[in-house]
Image (cartoon, helix red, strand yellow):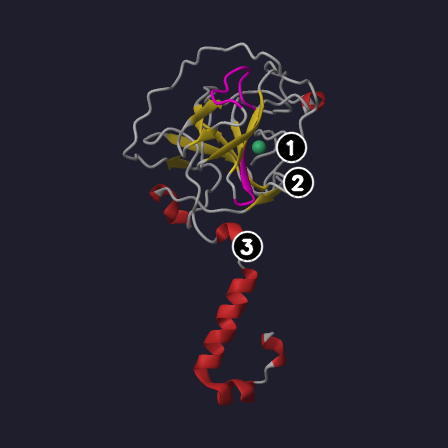
Amino acid sequence: MAQSVSKSAWLAAGPLALAVVLLLAASNDAPRAKAAPLFKLPWQPGLRMFVLQGPNQGTHAGYSSQYAYDFVPGPFSRERFTVRAARAGKVAKVVQQYADSPDCNPSYNGEANYVLLDHGDGLGTLYLHLTQKSVIPKAGAYVQQGDPLGQSGHTGYVCGPPHLHFTVLELKTWKSLDVTFADADTLRDGGRLRVNQWYLADAGARTYTVDLPFVPRRIASTPRTQPPTPADPGGSARAP
Ligand SMILES: [Zn+2]
């Protein structure tokens, strides 16, 4: 748009026209998920987690994982943590029948446990690699932001320690989206997260009564169909 406007036209039109053009350009360029920080870090408020792998790094290069994050309690930690809803939504899908997988084995790509939340506006959040039978809400249930969903784990094609692979998705296409977080600790990076950094989830007013350890529950009938798991193992193998 701006290329077709000559310098003399700019001078003649004045600053108002320039402002209008800049506003139009800004609105055209802004993906919708950037509009507002709807999402919060998906773990217990008051805790820090470490970013093992971030957007466009290592295995986070595919259509459904480009803007994903891998979270662990620390750079050398193999501990698992309670994964919480980044935003209120409906539980669109639960897969949790799979046991831990051997490290870095691509033949386990279709055996990742996960929760998919539908946020009602075309956006979803994916919580991947969860521990077997650790998922708390049932498919079809509604969860609030911060509600516990399950436990991070090592299911599917995972290289490295148990972790949470998290991404916001456009539900219709399963395209991974670049979003910002609302937690105050993320604002130093504009709401985005850098690899090899810890981030503190906001200590909110809510207190949570359900937390580790989980009581494993038997799932009555979980169809053994191949889930639409994004072709991404997550993990730290190729992270710097
Ligand atoms: Zn990942």
Q: Which amino acid type is marked by label 3? A: Pro
Quarter of the displayed picture in which ligand 1 can be seen? top right
Q: Is residue 211 at all visible to an observer of this figure?
A: yes
- Quadrant of the rendering where the N terminus is positioned: bottom right
> Which residue sits at x=60%, y=40%?
171
- Viewer-proximal residue among 134 and 60: 134
- Give the SS element for disc 3: loop
Q: Is residue 88 magenta?
A: no
Q: Which amino acid type is marked by label 1? A: Asp
- Viewer-proximal residue among 55 and 166: 166
- Viewer-proximal residue among 138 and 173: 138
Q: Position of residue 178 (x, y in %)?
A: 54, 47
Q: Position of residue 45 (x, y in %)?
A: 34, 31
- Give the SS element for disc 1: loop
Q: Are marks 2 and 1 in contact (CB under 8 Å)?
A: yes
User: Which numbered circle lies on residue 153?
Assistant: none
Q: Which amino acid type is marked by label 2? A: Gly
The residue wearing badge 2 is 62
Q: Position of residue 180 (x, y in %)?
A: 46, 47
Q: Which numbered disc, 3 or 1, marks the residue that appears first in the sequence?
A: 3
User: Which numbered circle lies on residue 232?
Assistant: 1
The residue wearing badge 3 is 31
Position of 159 relative to 189 (above/below)? above
> Which residue sits at x=36%, y=35%?
201
Q: Is residue 122 magenta?
A: yes
Question: Residue lying farthest right?
Answer: 107
Disc 1 residue: CB within 8 Å of ligand 1 = yes
Mark 3 and mark 1: Cα distance apart in space? 23 Å
**Which residues, given as a range, are shown in magenta?**
121-138
